[in-house]
Amino acid sequence: MNKNFSRIITLLRKERGLSQKQASSDLNISQALLSHYEKGVRECGLDFVIKLSEYYNVSCDYLLGKTPERNGARLTVDDIPDPNLCKDNVFKGSILPTLNKKLISNSINIIFDLLQKVNNKSLTTEASSYLMLSIYKVFRYIYSINPKNPQGIFDISKYKKDGLLNASLFITDNNLDCITSGINTNEFEKLDKKSAPILSSEIISKEYPLFSSSLHNLIQRSEQVIKKETDTK
């Protein structure tokens, strides 16, 4: 059985606020057997997977960890909403979250447009991974504020998270350095530096009139943070 199965069925039960006793009774199995399934000690048959999918109203693919979508849908590019077109994509209240979100999302628009122009698969993959890992890390910090939030949403335990995540960020950062420096390895697609766009503050402002201000502000704010952190060490 997929290793995610035990984690997911435990998460679903806790989200429903059900005890093992209640869930096992509803599913017509012993509490001990359900406990074994949730701990990954024993594997269940396909019939029981289907029974669980009906009980929790999720797909079998979700139970087996094949998709993060509970209805079993496989995400495509067309399925992802464009944040720039979402009318409800507006923060209420504090100005700071709204401002920072716009600076980051607008700057990311520029980054991915530039990645398309460079047209290097390895560079796009590593840059995307670095950004996703960074967002994942921040989300886990926020998620962990409330100790009642079920940790089963994550496959990697909180005890292993910091070391593995920081290592992944370090490796991805090193990969980006190798690719952009033109270091030839069999692992990455060779970067054709002739395809790299010519950039300057003026060119960026001209090419991206809607987003350039956000990027320039992000650069300034980032360097302020760097200087502040290094000055206090």
Image (cartoon, rainbow, N blue to C red):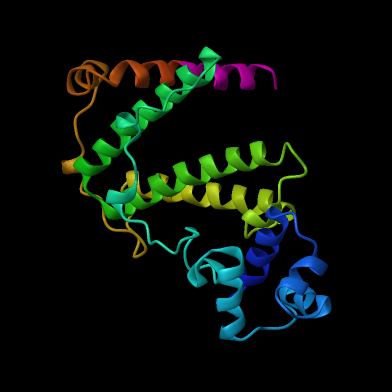
Q: Position of residue 179 (x, y in %)?
A: 35, 49
Q: Position of residue 62 (x, y in %)?
A: 52, 66
Number of numbered callouts drawn: 0
The residue nearer to you, when weighing 189 against 137, is 137
Left or right of 224: which side holds 179? left
Say if 182 sits above or below 40 in the image: above
Q: Residue 228: horizontal and vertical position, in percent? A: 61, 16
Q: Residue at x 25, y 19 (%)?
A: 210
In depth, the one of 135 and 165 nearer the eye is 135
Highlighted magenta segment, given as a residue range: 221-233
Quadrant occupied by the C terminus:
top right
Which residue is painted at 40% across and 15% down in the image? 217
Q: Residue furthest top?
A: 95
Left or right of 72 in this view: 125: left
Residue 232, compared with residue 135, is above or below; it is: above
Is residue 224 highlighted in magenta? yes
- Give the camera-side residue of 215 and 10: 10
Q: Main secondary structure of the magenta part?
A: helix
Is residue 61 depicted above or below 115 in this figure?
below
| Residue 181 can be seen, yes or no | no
- Answer left or right for 145 relative to 97: right
Question: Residue at 63% of width from left, 55% of height from top?
Answer: 154
Quadrant of res 44: bottom right
Q: Quadrant of residue 3?
A: bottom right
